Amino acid sequence: MAMVLYEMAASPNAKRARLGLLESGEPFESREVNLLTGEQKQDEYKSVHPMGRIPALDDDGTIIWESGAILLYLADKFPQSGLMPTDLAARGQVYQWLTFGETSIHGYMGPMGFQMFRKAPDKRDEGILSRGRQRMPEVLDILDRQLEGHDYIVGDFSIADCACAPWLELGEFFGIEMGRFENVNAWMSRMQARPSWSA
Ligand SMILES: N[C@@H](CCC(=O)N[C@@H](CS)C(=O)NCC(=O)O)C(=O)O
Protein backbone atom coordinates (compact mmCIF):
# COMPACT_ATOMS: atom_id res chain seq x y z
CA MET A 1 0.00 0.00 0.00
CA ALA A 2 1.32 3.45 -0.91
CA MET A 3 2.27 5.81 1.89
CA VAL A 4 -0.30 8.52 2.63
CA LEU A 5 0.70 12.09 3.49
CA TYR A 6 -1.86 14.23 5.30
CA GLU A 7 -1.12 17.77 4.25
CA MET A 8 -2.41 21.10 2.96
CA ALA A 9 -0.85 22.90 0.04
CA ALA A 10 -0.05 26.14 1.87
CA SER A 11 1.53 24.52 4.93
CA PRO A 12 5.32 24.89 5.25
CA ASN A 13 5.46 22.10 7.86
CA ALA A 14 3.66 19.76 5.48
CA LYS A 15 5.99 20.89 2.71
CA ARG A 16 8.96 19.62 4.71
CA ALA A 17 7.53 16.11 4.68
CA ARG A 18 6.37 16.43 1.09
CA LEU A 19 9.88 17.40 -0.04
CA GLY A 20 11.31 14.35 1.71
CA LEU A 21 8.77 12.05 0.06
CA LEU A 22 9.30 13.50 -3.40
CA GLU A 23 13.07 13.42 -3.02
CA SER A 24 12.86 9.77 -1.95
CA GLY A 25 11.27 8.99 -5.29
CA GLU A 26 8.86 6.59 -3.59
CA PRO A 27 5.12 6.61 -4.41
CA PHE A 28 2.71 8.24 -2.00
CA GLU A 29 -0.83 9.55 -1.94
CA SER A 30 -1.80 12.97 -0.70
CA ARG A 31 -4.80 13.59 1.57
CA GLU A 32 -5.74 17.24 1.95
CA VAL A 33 -6.67 18.33 5.48
CA ASN A 34 -8.45 21.67 5.36
CA LEU A 35 -7.10 23.75 8.25
CA LEU A 36 -9.37 26.64 7.36
CA THR A 37 -12.53 24.63 8.02
CA GLY A 38 -11.08 23.03 11.16
CA GLU A 39 -10.88 19.52 9.68
CA GLN A 40 -7.65 18.97 11.64
CA LYS A 41 -9.57 19.16 14.92
CA GLN A 42 -12.28 16.65 13.94
CA ASP A 43 -12.20 13.28 15.69
CA GLU A 44 -11.60 11.43 12.43
CA TYR A 45 -8.34 13.25 11.73
CA LYS A 46 -7.32 13.31 15.41
CA SER A 47 -7.27 9.52 15.27
CA VAL A 48 -4.33 10.03 12.88
CA HIS A 49 -2.68 13.02 14.59
CA PRO A 50 -3.84 13.47 18.19
CA MET A 51 -2.62 17.10 18.23
CA GLY A 52 -4.80 17.90 15.21
CA ARG A 53 -1.95 19.20 13.07
CA ILE A 54 -0.37 18.48 9.73
CA PRO A 55 1.66 16.79 8.42
CA ALA A 56 1.18 13.13 9.31
CA LEU A 57 2.39 10.10 7.41
CA ASP A 58 0.59 6.76 7.28
CA ASP A 59 2.92 4.05 6.04
CA ASP A 60 0.64 1.02 5.85
CA GLY A 61 -0.63 1.54 9.38
CA THR A 62 2.57 2.97 10.85
CA ILE A 63 1.64 6.55 11.66
CA ILE A 64 4.31 9.19 12.12
CA TRP A 65 3.65 12.84 12.90
CA GLU A 66 6.03 15.77 13.42
CA SER A 67 7.62 16.76 10.12
CA GLY A 68 11.17 16.21 11.40
CA ALA A 69 10.31 12.68 12.51
CA ILE A 70 8.75 11.97 9.12
CA LEU A 71 11.94 13.12 7.40
CA LEU A 72 14.10 10.93 9.63
CA TYR A 73 11.78 7.97 9.07
CA LEU A 74 12.01 8.38 5.30
CA ALA A 75 15.81 8.63 5.45
CA ASP A 76 15.92 5.41 7.50
CA LYS A 77 13.42 3.58 5.33
CA PHE A 78 15.05 4.55 2.04
CA PRO A 79 18.79 4.66 2.74
CA GLN A 80 19.52 4.54 -0.99
CA SER A 81 17.63 7.79 -1.57
CA GLY A 82 20.43 10.18 -0.62
CA LEU A 83 18.30 11.92 2.04
CA MET A 84 20.95 11.24 4.68
CA PRO A 85 24.75 10.93 4.41
CA THR A 86 26.35 7.67 5.56
CA ASP A 87 29.27 9.26 7.42
CA LEU A 88 28.43 9.59 11.14
CA ALA A 89 29.87 13.09 11.54
CA ALA A 90 27.82 14.30 8.57
CA ARG A 91 24.73 12.59 10.00
CA GLY A 92 25.29 14.47 13.24
CA GLN A 93 25.30 17.70 11.23
CA VAL A 94 22.03 16.70 9.56
CA TYR A 95 20.43 16.06 12.98
CA GLN A 96 21.68 19.43 14.18
CA TRP A 97 20.38 21.45 11.23
CA LEU A 98 17.11 19.54 11.07
CA THR A 99 16.54 20.44 14.72
CA PHE A 100 17.65 24.03 14.02
CA GLY A 101 14.93 24.15 11.34
CA GLU A 102 12.34 23.01 13.87
CA THR A 103 13.40 25.06 16.85
CA SER A 104 15.06 28.22 15.57
CA ILE A 105 13.36 28.77 12.20
CA HIS A 106 9.94 27.29 12.99
CA GLY A 107 10.24 28.54 16.59
CA TYR A 108 9.92 32.13 15.37
CA MET A 109 8.22 31.73 12.00
CA GLY A 110 5.55 29.20 13.06
CA PRO A 111 3.88 31.66 15.46
CA MET A 112 4.30 34.42 12.86
CA GLY A 113 2.56 32.18 10.33
CA PHE A 114 -0.36 31.66 12.67
CA GLN A 115 -0.78 35.43 12.93
CA MET A 116 -0.35 36.04 9.20
CA PHE A 117 -2.56 33.23 7.89
CA ARG A 118 -5.10 32.57 10.59
CA LYS A 119 -5.86 36.01 12.01
CA ALA A 120 -7.52 39.02 10.40
CA PRO A 121 -4.99 41.86 9.93
CA ASP A 122 -6.53 43.97 12.72
CA LYS A 123 -6.51 41.01 15.14
CA ARG A 124 -2.86 40.02 14.70
CA ASP A 125 -0.55 40.01 17.70
CA GLU A 126 2.05 42.54 16.58
CA GLY A 127 4.33 41.52 19.46
CA ILE A 128 4.75 38.04 17.96
CA LEU A 129 5.42 39.49 14.51
CA SER A 130 7.95 42.05 15.69
CA ARG A 131 9.76 39.51 17.88
CA GLY A 132 10.18 37.23 14.85
CA ARG A 133 11.39 40.14 12.70
CA GLN A 134 13.92 41.06 15.38
CA ARG A 135 15.20 37.55 16.10
CA MET A 136 15.25 35.93 12.67
CA PRO A 137 18.27 37.89 11.36
CA GLU A 138 20.50 36.10 13.91
CA VAL A 139 19.09 32.73 12.79
CA LEU A 140 19.59 33.64 9.14
CA ASP A 141 23.11 34.89 9.78
CA ILE A 142 24.09 31.53 11.31
CA LEU A 143 22.57 29.64 8.39
CA ASP A 144 24.21 32.02 5.91
CA ARG A 145 27.65 31.34 7.39
CA GLN A 146 27.03 27.58 7.24
CA LEU A 147 26.12 27.86 3.57
CA GLU A 148 29.32 29.73 2.65
CA GLY A 149 31.03 27.55 0.04
CA HIS A 150 28.27 24.88 0.27
CA ASP A 151 25.51 24.15 -2.22
CA TYR A 152 23.41 22.61 0.54
CA ILE A 153 23.45 22.88 4.32
CA VAL A 154 25.73 19.95 5.06
CA GLY A 155 27.38 19.96 1.62
CA ASP A 156 25.26 17.47 -0.29
CA PHE A 157 21.48 17.69 -0.36
CA SER A 158 19.83 16.07 2.69
CA ILE A 159 16.72 16.20 4.86
CA ALA A 160 18.32 19.17 6.67
CA ASP A 161 17.49 21.22 3.56
CA CYS A 162 13.91 19.88 3.51
CA ALA A 163 13.54 20.91 7.16
CA CYS A 164 14.91 24.44 6.83
CA ALA A 165 13.78 25.81 3.46
CA PRO A 166 9.96 25.80 3.44
CA TRP A 167 9.39 28.47 6.11
CA LEU A 168 12.11 30.74 4.73
CA GLU A 169 10.23 31.12 1.46
CA LEU A 170 7.78 33.23 3.47
CA GLY A 171 10.43 35.46 5.06
CA GLU A 172 9.88 38.63 3.00
CA PHE A 173 6.10 38.22 3.19
CA PHE A 174 6.37 38.10 6.99
CA GLY A 175 8.43 41.32 6.95
CA ILE A 176 11.82 39.71 7.62
CA GLU A 177 14.69 41.41 5.79
CA MET A 178 16.15 38.59 3.68
CA GLY A 179 18.17 40.52 1.08
CA ARG A 180 21.57 40.59 2.77
CA PHE A 181 21.75 36.82 3.33
CA GLU A 182 23.31 36.03 -0.03
CA ASN A 183 24.22 32.41 0.68
CA VAL A 184 20.74 31.71 2.01
CA ASN A 185 19.16 33.30 -1.07
CA ALA A 186 21.39 31.33 -3.46
CA TRP A 187 20.56 28.10 -1.61
CA MET A 188 16.83 28.92 -1.68
CA SER A 189 17.11 29.38 -5.46
CA ARG A 190 18.75 25.95 -5.69
CA MET A 191 15.99 24.44 -3.57
CA GLN A 192 13.29 26.13 -5.66
CA ALA A 193 14.89 24.79 -8.86
CA ARG A 194 14.61 21.18 -7.67
CA PRO A 195 11.62 19.38 -9.22
CA SER A 196 10.38 18.43 -5.74
CA TRP A 197 9.83 22.09 -4.77
CA SER A 198 6.83 22.70 -6.98
CA ALA A 199 5.58 19.15 -7.57
N1 LIG B 1 6.11 20.67 14.91
C1 LIG B 1 5.03 20.28 14.03
C2 LIG B 1 4.20 21.51 13.71
C3 LIG B 1 2.95 21.15 12.92
C4 LIG B 1 2.04 22.35 12.75
O1 LIG B 1 1.92 23.21 13.64
N2 LIG B 1 1.36 22.41 11.60
C5 LIG B 1 0.41 23.45 11.37
C6 LIG B 1 0.34 23.80 9.88
S1 LIG B 1 1.83 24.54 9.25
C7 LIG B 1 -0.97 22.97 11.79
O2 LIG B 1 -1.32 21.86 11.47
N3 LIG B 1 -1.74 23.76 12.50
C8 LIG B 1 -3.03 23.35 12.89
C9 LIG B 1 -3.79 24.44 13.50
O3 LIG B 1 -3.27 25.54 13.52
O4 LIG B 1 -4.92 24.25 13.90
C10 LIG B 1 5.63 19.67 12.76
O5 LIG B 1 6.72 20.06 12.37
O6 LIG B 1 5.00 18.76 12.18
Image (spheres, rainbow, N blue to C red):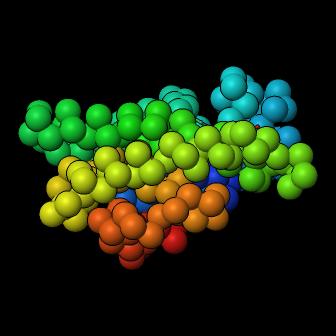
Q: Is 180 above or below relative to 106? A: below
Residue 189 spot, x, y in % from top left: 38, 73
Q: Residue at x 50, y 57 (%)?
A: 168
* Count of marks overlaid on the render: 0
Q: Quadrant of ligand 1?
A: top right
Q: Residue at x 68, y 35 (%)?
A: 53
Residue 166 spot, x, y in % from top left: 50, 56
Q: Is residue 199 left or right of residue 98?
A: right
Q: Residue at x 51, y 70 (%)?
A: 199
Q: Residue at x 14, y 40 (%)?
A: 90
Q: Is residue 105 left or right of residue 189?
A: right
Please tell me which residue lies in front, 172 or 160.
172
Residue 77 spot, x, y in % from top left: 32, 39
Please tell me which residue lies in front, 102 or 128.
128
Residue 61 spot, x, y in % from top left: 55, 30
Residue 18 shows in this picture: no
Q: Is residue 127 left or right of residue 21?
A: right
Q: Is residue 94 left or right of residue 196?
A: left
Residue 46 shows in this picture: yes
Please tell me which residue lies in front, 60 or 110.
110
